[in-house]
Image (spheres, grey):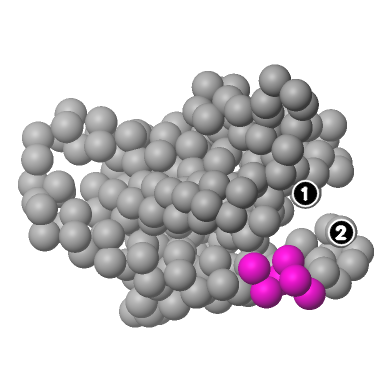
Amino acid sequence: MIKTQDGLRKPSIFEVFYYFVLSLLLNAIGNGLTVAANMGSSMWTASAANIALDFNFSISWVLIIYGTSQILINIALTRRFDAPRILGNIIFISLFGPFVGIFKQFFLTLGIPNLPLPLIIIFDLFGICLIAVAISIYQRLNLILHPGDEMTNILRFQYFKGNAKIAQWVNFSIPALIMIILTIIFRQITAVNIGTVFALFFQGTVLGYADIYIFPKLTHRL
């Protein structure tokens, strides 16, 4: 919903398109940047990067498979099958996975991993903040969501009384467990570093601030 002097109104078609495309691109750029920097990605992306490494899969396909699994978890959390919303989830992950792969390759080509370490860390943390801002925008729009971020939205408003930080931690517990198991089995790990710790403890906080300061007139449509 859009906040105006006369109260709340629905966003126009143009506004919906603008906010959705912007948030999708910010999310894909942020994820591609963190994977290319290899100084730690957000938890789900880091987990996907490790599956891709351990099983020699494309990270784009792993992210699509993850998205499908998250849809099933969301059905269990809400206890209902919402066909239009699930179709939106499928559209999102079909676009998101390939875009992350494209931006990852773009940042590798730019030579991000070859920069001085302090700059790599800055780019990595910036990427995680971009992800949080993107999530904030399309969660407030609440029309077409990535299923992983819809899971956070469901947890936040149906289980944790609007607390973004706790909802994000519970969401992240799943990929964290997967990474622990993979590390024990394969004795290797990637995309886990200072950025992952930052995402674990502060991504929910950044998301909460983005709700307030980034497009403040765009409010949650529950």
Report x, y in % for residue 157. 81, 39
Q: 88 or 36: nearer the eye?
A: 88
Which residue is pictured at 85% across the width and 72% down the height? 81
Say which amino acid is labelled 2. Thr
Picture layout, residue 219 above or below residue 108: above
Question: Circle 2 is placed at which residue position?
Answer: 78
Question: 102 left or right of 63?
Answer: left
**Quarter residue 186 falls in:** bottom left
Q: Please name the predominant secondary structure of the magenta segment in the image.
A: helix
Q: Residue furthest front?
A: 6
Please state if 117 lies on the left or on the right of 222 as rendered. left
Q: Mark 1 — residue?
A: 154
Q: Is residue 141 left or right of residue 9?
A: left
Give whichever of 193, 67 is nearer the camera: 67
Q: Is residue 71 above or below residue 22?
A: below
Report the quarter where the N terminus lies: top right
Which image quadrant: the C terminus? top right
Examine the rendering and report whether any part of residue 154 can be seen: yes
Percent across and percent down for residue 208 are: 61, 27
Instruction: Please say if the residues under marks 1 and 2 sit with CB atoms less than 8 Å apart.
Output: yes
- Rendered view: 106 above or below 56: above
Return the mark for residue 4: none
Q: CA distance from mark 1 to mark 2?
A: 8 Å
* Place of residue 26 in the rendered image (x, y in percent of width and height, measured from the top left): 40, 47
Residue sitting at 50 percent across and 28 percent down? 214
* Total labels drawn: 2
Q: Which contiguous range is marked in magenta?
A: 83-88
Q: Position of residue 34 (x, y in %)?
A: 32, 48
Type of amino acid under label 1: Ile
Question: Which of disc 2 and disc 1 is earlier in sequence?
Answer: 2
